[in-house]
Amino acid sequence: MSYAIIRNTKYKRENLKGIFRHNERRNINYSNDNIDKEKSYLNYSIKSPQYSYEKEFDRIKEKYNLKGQIKTVSNIACEYIITSDHDFFERIGEEETKRFFETAYKFVAEYKNLGEQYIISAKVHRDEQTPHMHLIFLPVVNTTDKKGNPIDKLACSEFWKAKDSYRQLQDAFYNYMVKNGFKLQRGLPKEETDRQHYSVEEYKKITNFKQTKEVLKNIKLEFPNVPDITDININRLSKKRDEKILEKIIKPKDNIIQNLYKDNLNLHRELSRQTKIIEETEKYQKERDSIIADNKELHNQVYNIKAEYKEKEFDIEWKYKSKIKSLEKENNHLNKVVDKFYDTVEKFINWICQKFGIGESKELVREFEKETNMYIDLEKQIKKEEREKEWDLEI
């Protein structure tokens, strides 16, 4: 029976860019030979991020006012890789495979009362040998502050506080999936298998990886020569004795040789598989290290660019403020000139009327505007000229 598999990895902020590009298939080339880019269209998201994982983290943290101290060395996100073996997915078919990952997604949202809002991305990969889901989430715990008020706190260490946290996760995931109709078995815990988790380099040393590769290159699996009863000199042996040799010696030895040959074939296959796994893991490790290095370099470049544009922004802002201040001063002066002009014109008209006994100044203004088709009021005159221009354009 197939196993229910869920593995967890913790990430710092600097890891998120590389993980985003791999999970969301944003890279052009991949060192992982298992990825068939022609099948990448089969990949799908149960939950898609709006932005990059880094920006999604910032958006969610701000939106839900997450508490907790976050440092450069803090683990701020976790990734579940959820899967089973290839035969399991072949056996249950496409529709049940889809239900498997949707059910696993619901499990994560409910486990430890996490909540779907703290899941950044859930991407199912169908372009590799075995279907699997990469699920990125924020390790948020529901707790209280010093005053006893309920808060949501981003705290990876508290989320995985128990010593047997991963065992609890494995048990809960297995029970949830079985309860929802998937025939799976629980993998043996580490305490029973005494299995340790090693780095790629440690595992290579332990397994004599280099020597194993050389042996696999040079080994020749050939079926050994087996004595044939026909090679025995019949003239020298009686038929009865000949049959005894065949039954008692040659056939048993022949069976032993065949069984050993089969065992060697199986061992060869297993060694080849282990070697391939290590090579692929090593490629992934190199790709990951390269992405992290590129991320640091890009982070430095972005920081320098921000600093440069901040300085330019300050210069531009200062220049525009100076220009605006100058224009405001000029505008105030022009307003005073216009006000003075109106006052002078009004006094001039009154003086003309009194000097020459023309009558009231208002009457004189009306006659002037009628005969010249112009307004003394400058605002009215400007509006009039603008309307006339509009009419000319319409014609």
Image: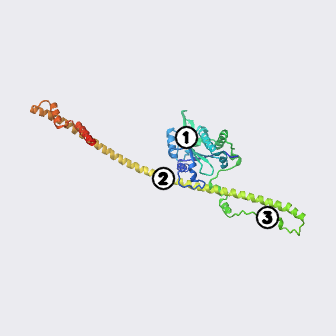
Query: Callout 2, which amino acid?
Result: Leu
Give the x, y percent position of residue 15. 54, 49
* Residue in front for this viewpoint, 293 or 259: 259
Residue shown at 51%/41% (left/top)?
A: 60
Residue at horizontal 66 percent and vertical 56 percent from the top: 273
- Number of other residues with Cα within 10 Å of mark 1, as a class: few under 14, some 14 to 19, many 20 or more: some
Residue 122 visible? The answer is: no
In this figure, which residue is indicated by the disc labeled 2? 298
Q: Hey, which residue is sitting farthest front in the picture?
A: 395
**Dot 3 and dot 1 residues touching (CB under 8 Å):** no
Callout 1: helix, strand or loop? Answer: helix
Q: Label 3 amino acid?
A: Val
Q: Where is residue 286, by image quadrant?
A: bottom right
Residue mark closest to the camera, 3 vs 1: 3
- On screen, residue 349 versus residue 122, left or right, reads left
Q: Nearer the viewer, mark 2 or mark 3?
A: 3
Residue 287 visible to an observer of this rendering = yes
Name of the residue lying farthest toward the left: 356
Distance between the alpha carbons at the discs numbered 2 and 1: 27 Å
For numbered disc 3, what is the local secondary structure? loop
Q: Is residue 312 above or below residue 336?
A: below
Q: Mark 1 or mark 2, which is nearer the start of the sequence?
A: 1
Looking at the picture, how far across and down is residue 36, in whole percent? 58, 53
Mark before the other along the chain sequence, 2 or 3: 3
Q: Earlier in the sequence, mark 3 or mark 1?
A: 1
| Dot 2 alpha-carbon crowd within 10 angstroms: few under 14, some 14 to 19, many 20 or more | few
> Mark 2 near mark 1, Cβ–Cβ under 8 Å?
no
Q: Residue at x 61, y 47 (%)?
A: 132
Pointer 1: what residue? 118
Question: Circle 2 sits in a helix, a strand or a loop, which is it?
Answer: helix
| Side (left or right) of 336 relative to 153 | left
- Provide the residue designation for mark 3: 226
